[in-house]
Amino acid sequence: MKFFVDTAEIDAIAELNDLGMVDGVTTNPSLILKSGRDILEVTREICDLVDGPVSAEVVATEAEAMIAEGRKLAQIADNIAVKVPLTWDGLKACKVLSGEGNMVNVTLCFSANQAILAAKAGATFISPFIGRLDDINTDGMDLIADIRTIYDNYGFETQILAASIRTVNHITESARIGADVITAPPAVIKAMASHPLTDKGLATFLADWEKTGQKIL
């Protein structure tokens, strides 16, 4: 499974990238706002930092304008994945941009039907939003499973990019189901290393070590 980090914060990306935990980065207008940076400037910096795909999202809502914005974003670096919303106009833009050789991440997917359309339109990635489905009392993991089954049934090459990940359990379940990629905030990725029994065991080892009176250095 590939790990994308969902942030526009350079320091957070760099820390995970140094550990080999970053296969790509996803951004969106909300994350750009949080960063306080110019979208072109910060996206270029991220692309210089990581080798994998960096999703940069259009903000237009009409197909022709999306295509124009997508072309502009794609000029930032070779590893840009243009991010478009899963609307009819977004699908039109996906078809054109992917046809021009660009990676395209179709985002805000909430149904298997939408995912089928994105694959047919040539999407490189489809981004189903797990957490937002959970928010309305629908199991977001069921959508990941449905898309996995459908894509496997018909050999669609679009990669399932599990998004809106809120917990480490979302990551575990995405891996179990067979999502190709997860994108999560840095804090959630780092939380994967935490377990109360690890903390308890370490505390015991350190207490016993102190009793030996020894030092390694």
Image: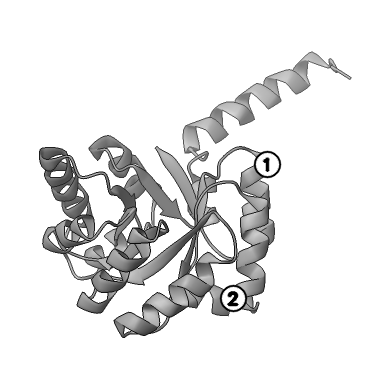
Residue 18, which numbered label? 1
Residue 215 lies, in percent from the top left, at 85, 18
Residue 82 visible, this orientation: yes
Kind of residue sitting beneath label 1: Asp
Above or below, 148 against 162 in this view is above
Residue 42: percent from the left, percent from the top?
65, 69
Q: Quadrant of the N terminus?
A: top left
In this figure, which residue is indicated by the disc labeled 2? 39
Amino acid type at image mark 2: Ile
Give the secondary structure at mark 2. helix
Residue at 54% x, 63% y is: 7
Query: Could one spot residue 164 in this view of the protein?
Result: no
Task: Give 135 or 196, whichever is nearer the viewer.
Answer: 135
Image depth: mark 1 or mark 2 in front = 2
Q: Which of the labelled discs sits on residue 68, or is there none?
A: none
Horizontal side, residue 109 vs residue 9: left or right: left
Residue drawn at x 27%, y 38% as measured from the top left? 178
Q: Helix or strand or loop: what does disc 1 sit on?
A: helix
Q: Residues within 10 Å of mark 1 (few under 14, many from 20)?
A: few
Which image quarter: residue 22? top right
Give the alpha-carbon distance from disc 1 to disc 2, as whole Å: 23 Å
Relative to 90, 145 lies left or right: left
Viewer-closest of 74 and 150:
74
Q: Specify which label sits upstream in the sequence, 1 or 2.
A: 1
Q: Position of residue 99 (x, y in %)?
A: 33, 60
Residue at the spot 40% in from the left edge and 67% down from the top edge:
83
Q: Residues within 10 Å of mark 2 (few under 14, many from 20)?
A: many
Taking 129 as reference, is 172 above or below it? above
The residue lying toward the viewer, choosing from 182 and 24, is 24
Is the residue 146 above or below the residue 100 in the image?
above
Left or right of 67? Residue 134 is left
